[in-house]
Amino acid sequence: MRILGINALFHDPAAALVVDGVTVAAAEEERFSRRKHGKRPVPFSAWELPERAARWCLARAGIRAAELDAVAYSFDPGLARPAADMGLFDPWDPLRLEYARRAPGFLAETLPGLDPEKVVFVPHHVAHAASAGPASPHPDSAVLVLDGRGEAASHLAGRYEGGELHTLAQQTLPHSLGLLYEELTEHLGFLRSSDEYKVMALASYGKPRFLPQMRQLVHATGDGGFTAHGVDWAALAPARAGDEEWNQDHADLAASTQAVLEETLLELAQWLHAAAGGDSLAMAGGVALNCVANSRLARLGPYRNVWVQPAAGDAGTALGAALHLARDPVPMRGADLGRGWSDDEIRHWLDEAAVPYERPDDIAETVAGELARDGVVAWFQGRSEFGPRALGHRSLMAHPGRAGNLERLNRVKGREEFRPVAPMVLADRAADLFDGPLPSPYMLFVHDVRRDWRARIPAVVHVDGTARVQTVDEGREPLVARMLAAFERRTGIPVVVNTSLNTAGRPMADDPRDALECFGSAPVDLLAIGPFAVRRGRAFA
Ligand SMILES: [Fe+2]
């Protein structure tokens, strides 16, 4: 059975292809269009489809649109209610709904040969849920979806049993933890529906002194749902203009909102555990990208295993919608579901670009040597990642032992200086250095850096002594693991700094041209692309 999943309506348009339960391909449109998040999440753009991502998914599997058994669209306009009835101020919502209703026709235009009758509307939060439970290593787990908004709700709590989703609670709009965080993001002068992770980083610089006021409006209600609506942000701290410096009030407001989010999340998980039992929880929805909240839940919550879909934002609903319709969905093995190139193809790109390159005996050793000499390395290997994190396929790397490398990487990327960069570590060494949920292959938790290691890896230790760790499993990621082991042999440190391969405001590099453009425009010493090494000194001599 061949099912194409489509996310298009709100954020992060994406496509995914599931064949006989196996996820063959999944990619976000931004990686093709080179426009961050694909489009702005406004009603006027709701008709836009992830055209290139969808066509690539089909091409990857060598099938035509006419051969699809179903197209799963991750929103069901039949469940929506007028925005005003849901307490939302969204005068253009009818336009968005109209586009959703007409999506089958738009899809048939975009993918010639597709029968529009094959398009199935999957409820938005069911799609998020299916990207969590069935995709996780524990398919029969409890699921918690925490989102901005779907058709008429912002959350779903349930349980998978024998592949069936049993929904136990849904919080209706306007109460929404995702919209609450988005409002704060906007109030603090960042880009709404895009920069929420900056607010999370800013929170660690503040004290939650507005927590009592926040608790009045934001808390779990004891029935599986919560209240979260109507915060008068300006009464707590003045709005920040985008070009203004942030001050302590801004950081304290971020810290207070982060704290109330964490408390609420914990209570929701406790309710779900009491209602559904089990020892595994799978999460999705944009709020599940909040790795600080996830860690508190993993540490203090009732579940032994907490798994978070790496594409927890709306992109992941493309995958979830397809998995929901699949008969026997197979858990995902990794996030490397995007585009990849053969060695010959990469060589061709390099020859076309006319840059000098070499093919060392082992690119992992070459990179480890460059990092040990304190070089910055662009690392382009295998298939690109599905979801917002670079996980060792499209990464920018540096030595973690020099504190100045945080600032240096932020400068390479042209981004705010309070933003931390993250460590990748060999899975079997992780517990020696970090305390927190392990393994952590998708960088969706934060960990305490053990005291004796803080001074040894200062570039990756955040102001509060934490780090957002990615663990690298040798069996799953042999090349990255070999590079980490080679770096440890040279330096005694089993960690390298890992951040995404892009410059500020741009999507992650996806194809070899993107990697070459990034290498050409930023002070990167070495580009490791497939088995080849391009050195700055030689390329620009
Ligand atoms: Fe969503």
Image (spheres, rainbow, N blue to C red):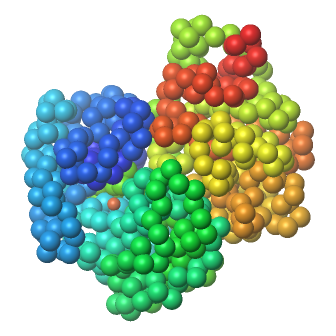
Residue 497 is left or right of residue 15, and the answer is right
Nearer the observer, 195 or 222: 195
Image coordinates of residue 197 in percent, x first then y, are 52, 58
Judging depth in this view, the residue of 408 and 530 nearest the camera is: 408
Residue 297 vs 477, above or below: the answer is below
Residue 537: image quadrant is top right
Q: Position of residue 518 (x, y in %)?
A: 58, 27
Is residue 86 shown above or below 288?
Answer: below
Residue 146 appearing in the image: no
The residue that appears at 24% across and 30% down in the rendered structure is 64
Question: Image point 37% across, 78% down: which residue?
Answer: 231
Split into quadrants, the picture shows ligand 1 in the one at bottom left
Identified at 77% across, 50% down, the residue is 459
Towards the viewer: 338 or 139 = 338
Q: Is residue 128 above or below residue 539?
A: below
Give the x, y percent position of residue 82.
12, 68
- Look at the image and tell me whether residue 516 can be seen: yes
Look at 59% across and 65% down and name the residue there. 247
Q: Quadrant of residue 97?
A: bottom left
- Quadrant holding the N terminus: top left
